Structures are given as structure tokens and as C-alpha cells.
Amino acid sequence: MSIDRAGTTAEPATGRDTVLGKAVAILRAFQPDDRILPLSELVRRTGLHKATAHRLAGALVENRLLDRADGGYRLARGLFELGMLASVERSLLELAMPFLQDLYERTHETVHLGVREGRDVVYVAKIGGHRQAESPSRTGGRIPLHCSAIGKALLAHSDPETRHAVLSGPLVRRTPHTIIAPGLLQRHLDGIVESGVAFEREESAPGIACCAVPVFGGDGEPLAAISVTGPTSRFRPEKAVAIVRAAAQGVGTVLVRREELQFPTP
């Protein structure tokens, strides 16, 4: 707290009340499926005054965090570039990319690398050619853990607290095939732990199938997961398990070796 000029005690501004907090609120107003948001929608989602939202959006455009687009604003490449500077994800991506590229060359299907953030999986990388499936994923995007193979691979091996938080819901239904019953999802996750692989069949979007395997660190904790996704019309995820598992194990081995070189045992 601080003392104002009248001698009364003033409450400190919360993070949401600061200029930075309001700018962050504008950026966080964008959802994974949003491409362009008009100013009126930014005002509605953030609760900011129109003049404030307009001024801050302009500042974000100047700093390459937003782009002006027809009828509104969209997230800019500068924001993605900042995200890729995050040390853990950047190191992980650099080490994993050769394995991801090899996996794509062997399958010619869409390959993902994802990490867990809260109750979502965040896609660190996505490789796909002209044959790629119409999946809802995008690099830097996120999706709930419970409705994708890569998310379930991470959730199955997460700590009990994270599992409980997700199973306690709400479990959003994205398609008729999304698992939203906590008991069924619990049994599904237990099976993933036993088999070491997670599958998805039209749970995040219609018409796609997927298999995913976690990448473990030296302490046995899941650092990320790798998946291959294809259309149900031609892709059989069971046939890709061996090569996805090999890629995940390869990335894990490289990560452990790097950690040992950086922090050798005395």
C-alpha cells in the first residue's frame, strides 16, 4: 500500500489494472480458433474501455505483437518469435527437430511435438506436407489434454495432482467421440501408462486419427510428447507406434545426454 497526497491509504494496483496487465489481457483474449478479432470483441472479452483497448492494441501493433487485419486485429509473428525464445521449449525443439523430420519422411503424415502447460497441450512444432490431415493443431496453439493423443500421453504420465485436476473437469466435448466421463478417461489413462502409447480417433476433430508417445527426461518425468496424425480414411495409427516410439526414445536419450554433460555427477 501507499499514501496518497490526501494522506489516505491507497490500495496497490493489481496486475490486471496496470498498463502491462491490460495489454496482456488483450493478447490472452485470442483463442486457438480465432484468426481476426474486431476491436468490439476485444472490448467485450477484456472488459476494457474502447479507447483503452484501441490505444493498447495500437501499441502492440507497433511492437509486432499484433497485426492490423481486415476488420480487426490478429496475433503477429513477433509474439510467436518471443515464445520460441523460451529456453526449455527452444532447446527441446532444436534437439527434437531431426527426429521429427525423420518421422515425417518415414510417414508423410503430420508430426507434432507438444508440451503440457496446465490442463492443455501446447504444440511446439508441427510438420506436415500437402497430404496433412485437417487437424485443429497449429504451432504455438493449444488444445485440452483429454481430447488428443499427444495430450493424453502427457496426462497419463503426469503427477496425481494434475490428473485429479483434469478429471475433476469440466471435460469439454469437442466431437461425439471425445471422452468426457471421468471414470472412463481414468481407465483410458491407466491403459496408456501400461502400453506406453496413446491413441486418438476423432476425439479432437472429425476425420483424424493419431498415436503419441511421451518423451521422458532423466528423472523419468514426461518432458514432451511426439505424435503422428493422419486422416481416418488412410491412416492406421497402430502401424506407426514403433517409429513414433523410436523417435520419442531418441529425443529422450539426447536430452538426458545433454543434461549429463551440463551437470556431470561429481
Image (spheres, rainbow, N blue to C red):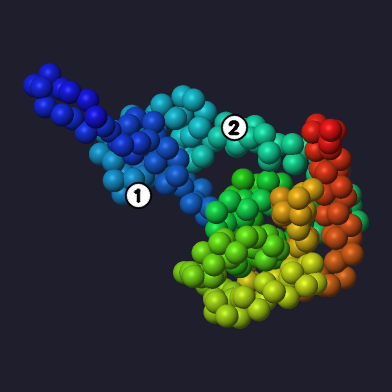
Position of 9 with respect to 133 (left or right) is left
Residue 94: x, y in percent?
Answer: 78, 37
Q: Residue at x 80, y 31 (%)?
A: 262
Q: Between marks 2 and 1, how big is the CA–CA gap?
A: 24 Å
Helix, strand or loop at mark 1: helix
Residue 216: x, y in percent?
Answer: 77, 53
Disc nearest the viewer among 2 and 1: 2
Residue 163: x, y in percent?
Answer: 58, 65
Q: Residue at x 76, y 50 (%)?
A: 219
Helix, strand or loop at mark 2: helix
Position of 145 with respect to 245 (left or right) is left
The reply to whether residue 71 is in sight is no
Mark 2 crowd level (few <14, some 14–19, many ≥20, 10 Å Cα): few
Position of 257 with respect to 61 (left or right) is right
Which amino acid is tagged 2?
Answer: Leu
Position of 152 with respect to 99 (left or right) is left
The image shows residue 42, relative to residue 194, as above or below, that is: above
Q: Residue at x 65, y 60 (%)?
A: 158
Q: Residue at x 60, y 64 (%)?
A: 160
Q: How many marks?
A: 2
Residue 21: x, y in percent?
Answer: 37, 35
Task: Residue under label 2, please give it.
Answer: 82
Q: Earlier in the sequence, mark 2 or mark 1?
A: 1
The reply to whether residue 90 is in sight is yes
Disc number for residue 45: 1
